[in-house]
Amino acid sequence: MLRSSKVIRASVFPLVCAVLFQSNISLGQEYPTKPIRMLVGLGPGGAADTTARLIGQKLTSELGQTVVVENRTGASGVIAYDKVATSTPDGYTLVMVTAAVTTLPFLQAKLPYDITKDLAPVALASTSSHVLLVHPAVKANSVAELIALARSQPGKLTYASTGIGSAQHMAGEYFNILAKTEVTHVAYKGGAESVLATVSGQVDITYGSLVAATNFINAGRLRALGITGTKRSPLLPSVPTISEAGLQGYDSIAWYGVMAPARVPEKIIIKLNTVIVKGTQTGDVKEAFNKIGLETQTHTPKEFGELIRAELVKNKSLVAQAGIKAQ
C-alpha cells in the first residue's frame, strides 16, 4: 500500500509541474486583460513623469489595455516604491524608478522594502547626463580652474541639487571625492529651483538639466564647464565631458526605468520589456526624449538588474566617503 502511494505521488508530480508550466505560459500570452497602473514617485512634468507617460502610451497601443500613470509623491519616492513592492505580483502595478532608488537604502535608516528582493527590474528606459554650471561671478572657465579655486577655498563654494540622495547630489559628492575638494551641498526641491538658485547667485554651482540650462547658457547667465556623462551632448556639443576636461574617470548619470513587484511571472516581465524597448526606439519617442536631454536604452531585464546592483555598490561607497548620514 505504501509503495502504491509513492507511485501515485511520483506520477502526479510531473502532471502538476506541467499544468503550472502551461498556466505560466498562458498567463504571459493572455496578459494583459485589464488596465495597468504605473506609479511615479515624483511630481508631474519632470523627466521621470515624462518618461513614464511616453512609455505608457506605447504600452497602451501595443498591449491593447490602458496604462494609467499615477503620481504618488512623498518620501523621495519611497511611498510609490513600497506601494508597488507590496502589490499583487501579476504585472498590473508597475513603478517608474530613478537613479535615486539606489541611494535610498544608504540614506534612510529603515526602508519598508528591499529593492533587490521586493522589486523586479523590467526595463531601463532612458539615461541622461547633467551639465556642470557655474554662476558668471565664479572665477573659473574650466573644470581644472574650478578645482583649483575650490581647493584654495575649502567649504566656501556651494553647489545646488534637487535634494539629498538625488542624482545631482551624488554628482556633486562624486566630484568632491575625485577632485579632493570641499564644495558645500545645498538641497532644493527640484531641478528648476536649483538652476534658478545658481542663476540668481544664491549658490555658485549646480548640475543642471541640459534642456533647462541651455537658454541660461546662451544668455550668459550661466557658464557650462562640463558634461557629467562619458560623452558630449548633442545639445551642447562644444562642452567637454568633465572627465576629458581634467577630472579623469568622472562619470555620473541619471537614469529612469520600470520595475514590478518581485515574483511577477517571467513571461510577463519579458513581454513588458519587449514592448518598452520597441517603443523607445520609435522616432516619435526618441525625438521627445532628445528634446529633454534623455537618451533611450535597450537593456534586457537582466542587464537592468546588473546596473541596479552596480549602482548600489557605487552609491554605498559614495555615501560613506561623503559622510552623508541616514535620515
Image (tube, helix red, strand yellow):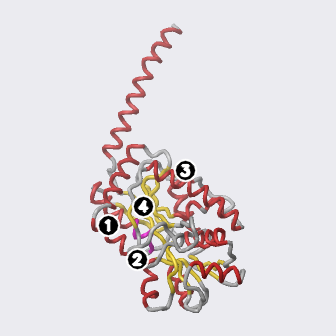
Q: According to the image, label 4 marks what residue?
A: 38
Secondary structure at numbered mark 1: helix
Q: According to the image, label 1 marks what residue?
A: 285
Kindly report the distance in space between the C-alpha atoms of the residues bearing marks 2 and 3: 41 Å
Secondary structure at numbered mark 2: loop
Secondary structure at numbered mark 4: strand
Q: According to the image, label 2 marks what residue?
A: 237
Kindly report the distance in space between the C-alpha atoms of the residues bearing marks 2 and 1: 22 Å
Magenta residues, start to end: 46-51
User: For the residues carrying marks 2 and 3, which lies nearer the camera in this image?
Assistant: 2
Kindly report the distance in space between the C-alpha atoms of the residues bearing marks 4 and 3: 16 Å
Instruction: Give neighbour class at mark 2: few <14, some 14-19, many 20+ (Cα, 10 Å).
Output: few
Q: According to the image, label 3 marks what residue?
A: 118
Magenta span: chief secondary structure = helix
Which numbered disc flags the more N-terminal residue, 2 or 3? 3
Reply above or below: 300 against 221.
above
Q: Are marks 2 and 4 in contact (CB under 8 Å)?
A: no
User: For the residues carrying marks 2 and 1, which lies nearer the camera in this image?
Assistant: 2
Q: Nearer the viewer, residue 61 or 286?
A: 286
Secondary structure at numbered mark 3: helix
Q: Amino acid at mark 2?
A: Pro
Which numbered disc flags the more N-terminal residue, 2 or 1? 2
Which numbered disc flags the more N-terminal residue, 4 or 3? 4
Instruction: Give neighbour class at mark 3: few <14, some 14-19, many 20+ (Cα, 10 Å).
Output: some
Instruction: Give neighbour class at mark 4: few <14, some 14-19, many 20+ (Cα, 10 Å).
Output: many
From the viewer's perspective, tell me whether residue 131 is left or right of residue 163.
left
Which numbered disc flags the more N-terminal residue, 4 or 1? 4
Kindly report the distance in space between the C-alpha atoms of the residues bearing marks 3 and 1: 30 Å
